[in-house]
């Protein structure tokens, strides 16, 4: 029995297979584009490597594409056929089976139980972190990373990457100063830690410090140049900061040349694109025909029903391109899927149904209805997954719907709540909306001529 680079036992026949497996784990931690090729090479050299098959299956499920669930089930079958008694592999197999069945909460529990026994297993720590992120479990992310922290001293080769996960969890739970320190430390230990880099970018966003955030990302481009499509997400963060300080032409240039450099239908890429275009349009920026290709892709994807986070961004594309009939069909499908009893179905039901109805109403100009439904989803929106920054587009649409509906007080209360999750300073969006609310109230107080 060999050991991988993080000290975990692996049943691999050759040093070459072990080198590829180590590269897989390194790729997962650093979000490297090379990870899938290394996994394919590892499984070619070791076709009975159960852990590798289970890992491949989880990769497929996390892509959020219904047509890949069959391939994920094949990976599960291969893992079970090759399985020998091994707690780590058993945890991965059980987690994969739970995800395929629509129970990612159970999948987290399987991974977490193993991590309790082996906190230095960086791969499973990262996968647990990723699943909790998809589930919107910020508190769980933070508690788990705090619990494993003692295992990641200076001598652990994954210390930087796990520190980057810790930085992100701290940011998502509002510990901004600690998050910045953890993120800087992570990059010192692992200069290609794109996740830690982006955690610090999140802090700049939440603190309304766009200029410093732009400077931070510009100085650190080497930390994410190697990434898979996660690099588009980091460019998205920079575009948000440019938007906040009014540099909309530059934000659109990043959209065209970086964020949508490859016009993929990966839901994460579509989320980046649709949420940026929505923000730009709310600020009155003309975005031309950019909605069209996103709507075409989204209309082909919206029967997936794998993640409500993906579905809501597909809906943004349909609404943005004025495809009312398609948007209503997606709303109906979300409502239909929300009648099940899986974790996925429960999130379709709440916050999915209210949020979807609100987005469709917004696109149709029914702002009273849009505000009612979007506001109803606010308390549970974290269950859709993603980060504060990603979900903020839905919060902005809620506030704008309230303003357009003349619900000044209710919109202001949501704006106040938004600010309480952030730093001391308000961003450009909040300042503009407060001015609109004040102007609306002033208009109501002005005697009719």
Image (tube, rainbow, N blue to C red):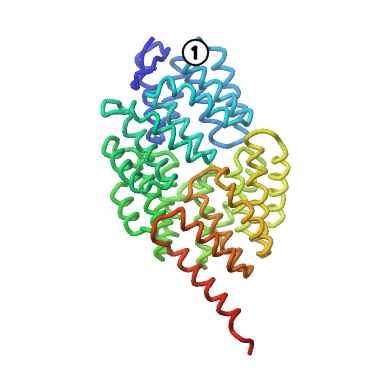
Residue 99 rendering spot, x and y as whole percentages: 58, 29
Question: Which residue is the extreme one toward the bottom?
Answer: 449
Query: What residue do we see at 62% from left, 27% from top?
Result: 70
Residue 126 rendering spot, x and y as whole percentages: 43, 31
| The quadrant where residue 361 appears | bottom right
Compare residues 318 and 134 and report the one nearer the observer.
134
Does residue 283 lie above or below 180 as drawn?
below
Residue 256 rendering spot, x and y as whole percentages: 45, 55
- Within 10 Å of disc 1 (Cα), the crowding (few <14, some 14-19, many 20+) is some
List the residue tagged with mark 1.
48
Does residue 107 lie above or below 293 as drawn?
above
Compare residues 323 and 256 and report the one nearer the observer.
323
Residue 247 rendering spot, x and y as whole percentages: 40, 64
Query: What residue do we see at 49% from left, 23% from top?
Result: 113
Pick the quarter of the image with the C terminus.
Answer: bottom right
Q: In this figure, what is the number of numbered marks?
A: 1
Does residue 58 lie above or below 196 as drawn?
above
Does residue 236 lie above or below 267 as drawn?
below
**Is residue 251 shown left or right of residue 386?**
left
Q: Secondary structure at mark 1?
A: loop
**Is residue 332 shown left or right of residue 16?**
right
Query: What residue do we see at 52% from left, 38% from top?
Result: 134
Pick the quarter of the image with the N terminus.
Answer: top left
Query: What residue do we see at 37% from left, 26% from top?
Result: 23
């Amino acid at each position: 029995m060999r050991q991988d680079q993080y000290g975990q036992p692996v049943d691999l026949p050759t040093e070459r297979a072990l080198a590829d497996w180590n590269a897989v784990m390194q790729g997962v931690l650093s979000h490297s584009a090379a990870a899938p090729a290394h996994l394919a090479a590892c499984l070619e050299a070791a076709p009975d490597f159960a852990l590798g098959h289970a890992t491949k299956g989880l990769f497929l499920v996390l892509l959020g594409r219904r047509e890949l669930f069959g391939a994920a089930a094949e990976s599960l079958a291969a893992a079970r056929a090759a399985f020998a008694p091994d707690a780590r592999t058993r945890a991965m197999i059980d987690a994969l089976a739970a995800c395929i069945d629509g129970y990612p909460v159970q999948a987290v529990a399987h991974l977490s139980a193993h991590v309790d026994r082996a906190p230095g297993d960086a791969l499973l720590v990262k996968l647990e972190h990723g699943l909790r992120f998809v589930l919107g479990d910020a508190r769980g992310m933070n508690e788990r990373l705090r619990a494993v922290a003692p295992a990641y001293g200076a001598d652990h080769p994954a210390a930087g990457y796990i520190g980057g996960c810790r930085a992100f969890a701290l940011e998502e739970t509002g510990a901004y100063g600690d998050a910045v320190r953890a993120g800087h430390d992570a990059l010192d230990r692992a200069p290609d830690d794109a996740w830690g880099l982006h955690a610090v970018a999140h802090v700049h966003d939440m603190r309304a410090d766009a200029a410093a955030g732009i400077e931070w990302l510009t100085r650190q481009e080497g930390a994410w140049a190697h990434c898979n499509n996660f690099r588009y997400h980091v460019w998205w963060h920079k575009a948000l900061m440019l938007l906040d300080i009014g540099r909309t032409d530059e934000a659109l240039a990043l959209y065209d040349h970086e964020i949508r450099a490859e016009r993929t239908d990966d839901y994460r890429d579509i989320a980046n694109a649709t949420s940026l275009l929505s923000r730009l349009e709310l600020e009155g920026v003309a975005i031309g025909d950019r909605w069209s290709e996103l709507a075409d892709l989204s209309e082909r994807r919206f029967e997936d029903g794998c993640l409500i986070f993906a579905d809501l961004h597909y809906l943004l594309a349909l609404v943005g391109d004025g495809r009312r009939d398609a948007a209503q069909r997606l709303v109906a499908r979300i409502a239909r899927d929300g009648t099940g009893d899986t974790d996925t179905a429960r999130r379709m039901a709440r916050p999915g149904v209210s949020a979807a109805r609100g987005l469709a109403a917004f696109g149709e100009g029914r702002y009273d209805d849009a505000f009612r439904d979007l506001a109803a989803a606010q308390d549970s929106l974290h269950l859709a997954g993603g980060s504060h920054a990603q979900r903020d587009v839905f919060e902005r649409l809620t506030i704008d719907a309230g303003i357009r509906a003349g619900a000044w007080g209710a919109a202001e209360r949501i704006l106040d709540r938004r600010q309480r999750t952030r730093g001391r300073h308000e961003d450009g969006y909040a300042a503009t909306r407060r001015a609109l609310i004040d102007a609306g109230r002033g208009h109501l107080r002005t005697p009719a001529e």
